[in-house]
Image (spheres, rainbow, N blue to C red):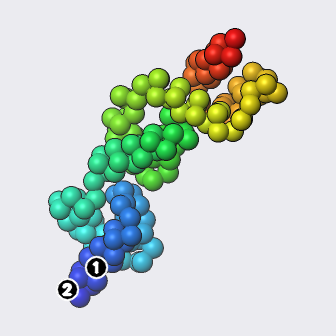
Amino acid sequence: MNNTVDIWKTALHILGRRSQSEYEMRQKLGQKEYAVEQIDDVINRLLTYGYVNDNKLAHLLFKKHVQVGKYSLNNIMCKLKQRGLPDDDIKDVTNNYASEEETISALKIVNNRFKSLEDVSQDKIYRFLATRGFSATTIHKVVQQLYHDEI
């Protein structure tokens, strides 16, 4: 009995610092060397109460990363996977992400990195955005917008 209360308090303490995915909770509770059955019971209880909700967390993190405007869709997906979120939840969240939003993020990144485009070649912008995970289509749109606006 005491051990069940102990693991529950530990789980709530972990959640008090930041939201966790189910995977992250399992990892952190496993590090504390609780029995697998106890971890399963606590995870089920957390899921029942809605304290751990991978879909909700995926939406929250995706929205946060999009608002920051510093990441490509590929980078955001990698960040969500690193948090241990299921592929179905990641697909659910990213399905409605429009290419225009990614183009806006890429433009923002380029404008922050390069104050003046006079000395910057198109190739340099291509490489810069490609290393940040932007698709070739998005990069092409950005370069077209940047160099057509100057003409």
Residue at 70%, 25% (x, y): give it. 126
- Residue 52's label in the rendered image is none
Residue 67, by quadrant, is: top left
Secondary structure type for disc 1: helix
Residue at 42%, 47% (x, y): give it. 64
Q: Front-most of 102 and 21?
A: 102
- From this viewpoint, is residue 136 visible? no
Q: Locate residue 85, reporting x and y percent.
A: 39, 48
Q: In this figure, which residue is indicated by the disc labeled 2?
A: 1
Q: Locate residue 112, reporting x and y percent.
A: 64, 39
Q: Front-most of 78 and 142?
A: 142
Q: Front-most of 45 and 57?
A: 57
- From this viewpoint, is residue 114 visible? yes
- Residue 9's label in the rendered image is 1
Residue 144, by quadrant, is: top right
Residue at 37%, 60% (x, y): give it. 20
Which amino acid type corresponds to the residue marked 1 in the rendered image?
Lys
User: Is residue 38 rendered to the left or right of residue 125?
Assistant: left
Task: Rate crowding at label 1 as few (under 14), some (14 to 19) or many (20 or more) other CA atoms within 10 Å.
Answer: few
Which amino acid type corresponds to the residue marked 2 in the rendered image?
Met
Q: Is residue 2 above or below residue 106?
A: below
Q: Locate residue 116, reporting x and y percent.
A: 74, 31
Task: Rate crowding at label 2 as few (under 14), some (14 to 19) or many (20 or more) other CA atoms within 10 Å.
Answer: few
- Residue lying furthest right in this view? 119
Secondary structure type for disc 2: loop
Q: How many angstroms separate mark 2 from mark 1 (CA)?
A: 13 Å
